[in-house]
Structure formats: structure tokens, C-alpha cells
Amino acid sequence: MIGEEGTGFTTALATLDHTRITIAAQALGIAQGALDYAAGYVKERRQFGTAIAEFQGVQFMLADMAMKLEAARQLTYRAAALSERAMAGEKVPGLTFASAAAKCFASDTAMAVTTDAVQLLGGYGYVRDFPVERMMRDAKITQIYEGTNQIQRIVVARQLLGDAR
């Protein structure tokens, strides 16, 4: 038995405050891999005699992907730091909010970044011969397990409203 009798549900929910952060970290890795692959691809792929990395629209997409990824990374690092403090026995207000927000934002970011990576690769991005197709599928599952992102939004809202049912 873990914890006192009758505290199983509360213990399980408290555990999610820590495990959601691992999903956020997984999402970051997927998104970073997709960004790295897409950036390499656009430097090599040529259209109209020039690398498509030279096109402003492509540069804007890469910049947006990188900025979203960095924001998700910082949110995840903050949640991880709070989790570490809690695991050391400190009472950490805001951990539930931070872990749910990190999981939700990072997994949404992974989905957005991988979708853009597929777009940057054009038709190649959609076939199994190129890794971004798998990365996009992997990103999707991070929005689902350890509580769907809809559930994460409920958790965040309840934390904001002081209703931690």
C-alpha cells in the first residue's frame, strides 16, 4: 500500500504533478528533432536555383517553430524545478498548475512544430521515408496520455479559480 488507507485517489493525482512533466519533456524532444530535421532539409532543398531556406516565408516558419519550442522548454524547466523541490519534501504551491500547463503547452507545441516540419518538407514530409511523419504521429500522443490537453486546461482553470476538486 502506498500512503494511508483511503488516500489512493489523492496520491494518484499528486503523482500526475510529476509525471506530466515527463510528457512535456518528451514533447520537447520530438519538437526539437522535427525543427532540426526541417532546418537541415530547407538548407539543402533547392527551388528556382536557390535553397528554400533563403525564402522569407520559410524563415518565418522556422523562427516561429523555434520561439514556440523555447517557450515550451522554459515552462517545462520551471515545472521540473518545482517538481524537484516538492520531491525534496518542500510544499510547493503552483506545482499542479505548472505541470499541467507545461504538459499542455509543450505537447500542443510539439504538434504545431511537427505539422510545420511536415509542411516544410512538402510531399516528402508525409511519407514514411522521412522521420517528420513519425514525429508528427508521436507528437499527437503527447496531447492524449497522462490526461488529455482538454483535461489539462480544466486543471489549469481550477487552479486559477481556487477549485482543486
Image: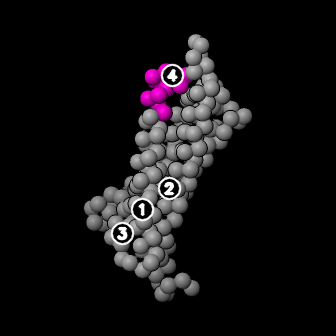
Q: What distance separates the C-alpha of mark 2 from that of mark 4?
A: 32 Å
Instruction: Read off the magenta span.
Output: 52-62
State which mark lies toward you, 1 or 3: 1
- At numbered mark 2, what does the secondary structure look like: helix, strand or loop? helix
Disc 1 or 2, which lies upstream in sequence? 2
- At numbered mark 4, what does the secondary structure look like: helix, strand or loop? helix
Q: What distance separates the C-alpha of mark 3 from that of mark 2?
A: 23 Å
State which mark lies toward you, 3 or 2: 2
Residue shown at 48% from the left, 87% from the top: 4
- At numbered mark 1, what does the secondary structure look like: helix, strand or loop? helix
The residue carrying mark 3 is 165
The residue carrying mark 4 is 54
In the picture, measured across the screen, residue 77 lies left or right of residue 120, that is left
Disc 3 or 2, which lies upstream in sequence? 2
Q: Position of residue 148 (x, y in %)?
A: 49, 54
The residue carrying mark 1 is 79
Residue 77 falls in image quadrant: bottom left
Residue 40 falls in image quadrant: top right
Q: Position of residue 32 (x, y in %)?
A: 54, 45
